[in-house]
Amino acid sequence: MPKTPILLGILFITGISAYSQVTKSARSARYGALKVSRGKALIMCPIFEESKYPYQGIGFKVGDPFAFTYKFYPTKHWAFAVDAGKAASGLYNKYYRGNFDAYIPDTLSQGSGQNIQYLAHRVPADWFLEAKFLYQWDAEKISKGLQLYAGAGWQWRNTSLEYSYLYNPSNNPNDLGTNGQFTRNRFTFGPVVLVGFEYSYFTLPISAFIEVEMFTDTFLDPGYQRFQGGVGLRYIF
């Protein structure tokens, strides 16, 4: 069989293959690098453009407390937030247990030979309201869309407590005593200071945040302090 036709056939097939590869590579080069328009860029990072303040945000926070949250951003660096919700009562069990003796009603005041023992307590309601002013600054050197913030504010708390107790009118060990309950409503308030960060580089107009607060009671139990904090999301508009 002559070798020339065979060689021509191999060269033809090789040429077709090479052309096909070059064509595919050219198409890949043409479509591989996408040019992002300004409209598309806004979709990728749609909020907190300096020229478009003020912004507002509504959302929720989980932790201590669980709260619905509203935030107003009048300028790039200043913001005002209001949170309202329910405290994580389980984190305060030791504190509420320690208040039992102070909350015993006068009608059960321990006299000679009387004995009142704590049995348990529950918290039917533990609500709070908080308002705070914040200063924010960019941390894009760490991550695009990241802001750090710090601030101060004021917190109001209203808690309903229900205590169960064992009452023994005498020191006689054969007297089993009687069970009883009483309730207390405690309202207090005080300042908070906080730090946190907010991240907003999403494909939706939302921001995620984490913050830690220090609450100081100045009314009902002056000097009592408690760390609080949580994580949350806000829809920005």
Image (tube, helix red, strand yellow):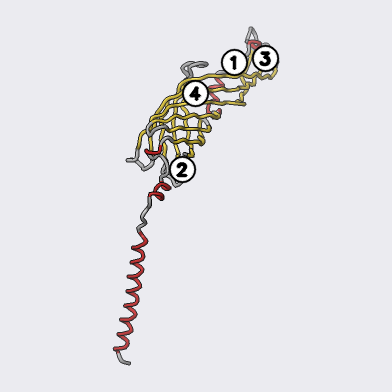
| Earlier-in-chain disc, 2 versus 1 | 1
Looking at marks 1 and 4 on the same chain, the residue that comes earlier in the sequence is marked by 1
Compute the Cα span from label 3 to label 1.
18 Å
Mark 2 or mark 3, whichever is nearer to me: 2
Residue 103 circle label: 1
Q: Position of residue 202 (x, y in %)?
A: 43, 45
> Which residue, given by chain and number where applicable, does mark 3 sit on?
168
Q: Earlier in the sequence, mark 4 or mark 3?
A: 4
Q: Residue 205: which numbered mark, if any?
A: 2
What separation in Å lies between label 4 and label 3 (alpha carbons)?
40 Å
User: SS at mark 4?
Assistant: strand
Q: Is residue 100 above or below residue 199?
A: above
> What kind of residue is marked 1?
Tyr
- Earlier along the polypeptide chain: callout 3 or callout 1? 1
Please identify the quadrant where the N terminus is shown: bottom left
**Left or right relative to 3: residue 188:** right
Label 3 Cα neighbours within 10 Å, binned few <14 / some 14-19 / many ≥20: some
Q: Residue at the bottom extreme?
A: 1
